[in-house]
Image (spheres, helix red, strand yellow):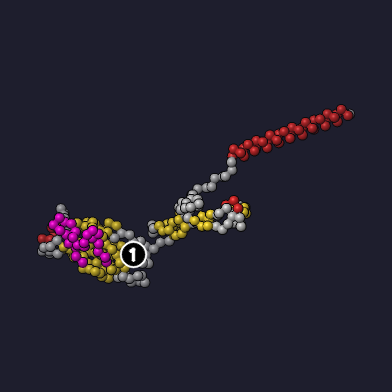
Amino acid sequence: ASLMGNLDSSKSTVASPTAVTSTMTVYDSLGVSHEVALTFTNTPATQSWTVTGTIDGTGTVTPTPATVTFNAAGTMTAPAAPLHTLSLSVPITGGATTPQTVTVGMSGITGAASATGTSSVRVADIDGYASGTLKDFSIGADGVITGSYSNGQKKSVGQLVVATFNNPAGLEKIGDNLYDRTMNSGEPAPETPGSGQAAKLTTGALEMSNVDLANEFSEMMITQRAYQANSKIITTSDTLMETLINMSR
């Protein structure tokens, strides 16, 4: 997770401490959500704040209390640069992996004076997610099958491969646009689509006909002409036969 906001530096001169709390939703190893609350309390007369944490209102997040400090320019000096992260150990019950480690980035928090005299810290980003079910999938040109889940996550769940042969012409046609290997074709060599001799995959598209339309039209015209010629020959023969029969009467 990452936090952003401002911890009012003017509170460093106030005798009584003030606090601001930021709450975030985290998920355990089973995908169950938990609420982690981080409370920042200023230390009077210093540019430091003490961080304490709880989970689900009861469990204590360690290592807290931790200390957040700023320099005179309001830039965070602890936790140390460049990431300014605080690694929290979150105790979780209910069969999940425990403790759960949550790394909180605080580089987005400043320690400047606030015009309103208040501090504000909020969650800028968090990468946890609940458990989900497979809702849809897609196949890329490289054959990778990517599943889309109900929790908004995407994950590679498998990959299709393309088999190549030393002698593709030696494959045996078995109907329905299918082929089978033979002694002449050699054994199949599975390859990643698009690599080596393997073709890429085209997804979400219908296969076009591999018929040569120009050639087929030509063949159709030739056949039609032959049919017409044969029809005329038959018609002429019938006419001659009819004439001969009439003459014989």
Left or right of residue 82, residue 245 in this image: right
Three-letter code for the amino acid on which mark 1 is drawn: Tyr
Residue at 67 percent across and 36 percent down: it is 222
Is 8 left or right of 169, judged from the image as shown?
Answer: left
Q: Position of residue 199 (x, y in %)?
A: 50, 50
Q: Residue 80 placed where, x, y %?
A: 21, 61
Q: Secondary structure at mark 1?
A: strand
In the picture as drawn, the residue positioned furthest to the right comes out as 249
Q: Residue at x 71, y 36 (%)?
A: 227
Q: Residue 17 falls in which quadrant of the image?
A: bottom left
Residue 180 appears in view: no
Q: Quadrant of residue 18?
A: bottom left
Work out whether 206 lies above or below 8: above
Question: Residue shown at 55%/57% (left/top)?
Answer: 188
Number of numbered discs on residues = 1
Residue 67: name its quadrant. bottom left
Please name the residue shown 72% across and 33% down the image: 229
> Whole-percent x and y of residue 38?
24, 64
Density class for disc 1 (Cα within 10 Å; few <14, some 14-19, many ≥20) is some
* Span colored in magenta: 66-88
Instruction: Tell me residue 185's x, y (percent).
Output: 59, 55
- Left or right of residue 32: residue 18: left
Q: Is residue 73 magenta?
A: yes
Q: Quadrant of the C terminus?
A: top right
Q: Quadrant of the N terminus?
A: bottom left
In this figure, which residue is indicated by the disc labeled 1? 27
* Magenta residue check for 213: no
* Front position in the image: 62 or 224: 224
Q: Is residue 146 visible to the viewer in this orientation of the structure?
A: yes
Q: Is residue 147 left or right of residue 169?
A: left
